[in-house]
Amino acid sequence: METTLNKSKKADLVISPTQLINHWQGHRSLTRRVIEAFPEDAFFNHTIGGMRPFSEMVMELLGIASPGIQEIATGKTSPLNEHFEHGNKKEQLLELWDKSTDEINRYWAQIKPDQFQNTIKLFGQYEGTVQSSIFYFIDNEIHHRGQGYVYLRSLGIEPPAFYER
Amino acid sequence: METTLNKSKKADLVISPTQLINHWQGHRSLTRRVIEAFPEDAFFNHTIGGMRPFSEMVMELLGIASPGIQEIATGKTSPLNEHFEHGNKKEQLLELWDKSTDEINRYWAQIKPDQFQNTIKLFGQYEGTVQSSIFYFIDNEIHHRGQGYVYLRSLGIEPPAFYER
């Protein structure tokens, strides 16, 4: 029976909760370096094709990541907020980024392994499973960071390598 | 013991193999619509900041996705190829895209559930686990597609919604 149990455990293990948080924090570390690569003025003002400056995309990511994981961990919902005090200082958003990194790790530890397939209504409006919500957080970050890469290239700045986390 | 077994199964189920392939094919469906949104000339020629035209990024994705999954499923390695005959016709790359979609589904069905944590050396050079490789395929596609969104916006074209798969 022990063999069956181990086999069954491994059979379902596409990615473990610990591997998933490490995967995400690896991406978040890269996004942090992309923020750092922006000149301060361009971070808040540079745009292409009527899109938002990268600072606004970053505030969207800040509004989703830590609050989203807190909601998954605690069950307490709150409305989505994508605006943060920054005074046009990159440093202020980087501080919020690092604070989020710690909060995500802390709340992640409270998520039970059997929660990932549960359905939730995130920020009171987005229905999905816990896993599909978390992958949305990650995918949405990769999507906007890819846009940040084009902004940097258009400014003549080489972005950090995509595969370095 | 049956209870322990079921509990253990669910405990590891962050995302099942079937959920993962559906997640990826959802992304691939969106990428296909982004390709379709490009005017043919811009698809092959429009660039920003010295980056590649979107067609070349798409050929990178074509070179990775189906060959990568074939290698995972069969164990047979081959060198990475990112160039395909297209004659500057979007239709030719869209046909390859659809062919890849079918191939990925066919080879995915041959991947054993206990393979995801195995280590592999993809295309004879990229070491990782099966799961980390597959997430790299997906993340890399999201990354470049995000760049395609900026190209489209810079051309005055509204891209398909990111959350529609």
Image (spheres, coloured by chain):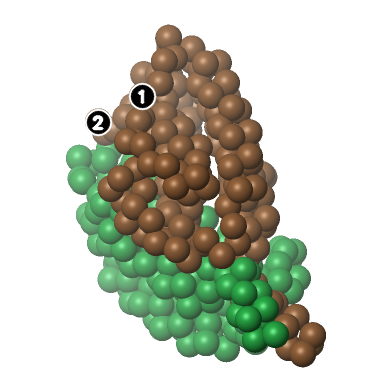
Chain colours: A brown, B green
> Which percent across, then down, holds residue A11?
65, 80
Q: Nearer the viewer, mark 1 or mark 2?
A: 1
Direction top: furthest residue: A87
Q: Which mark is residue A50?
A: 2
Quarter residue A120 falls in: bottom left
Residue neighbourhood size for the residue with mark 1, other residues' Cα within 10 Å, grouped as few (<14), some (14–19), many (≥20): few
Considering depth in this image, is B163 or A149 the residue closer to the camera? B163
Please name whichever residue, B23 or A11, is drawn nearer the observer in this view of the structure.
Answer: A11
Occupied quadrant, residue B77? bottom right
| SS at mark 2 in the image | loop
- A92 vs B158, left or right, is right
**Relative vertical location of residue B109 with respect to residue B133 in this rendering, above or below:** below
What amino acid is labelled 1 in the image?
His
Taking the image as drawn, is residue B51 in sight? no
Q: Which residue is at a point 63% across and 58% down the rendered structure image?
A: A17
Q: Nearer the viewer, residue A78 or B132?
A: A78
Residue B152 location (% of width, % of height): 28, 45
Q: Chain of mark 2?
A: A
Q: Which amino acid type is shown beneath numbered disc 2?
A: Gly
Disc assigned to residue A83: 1
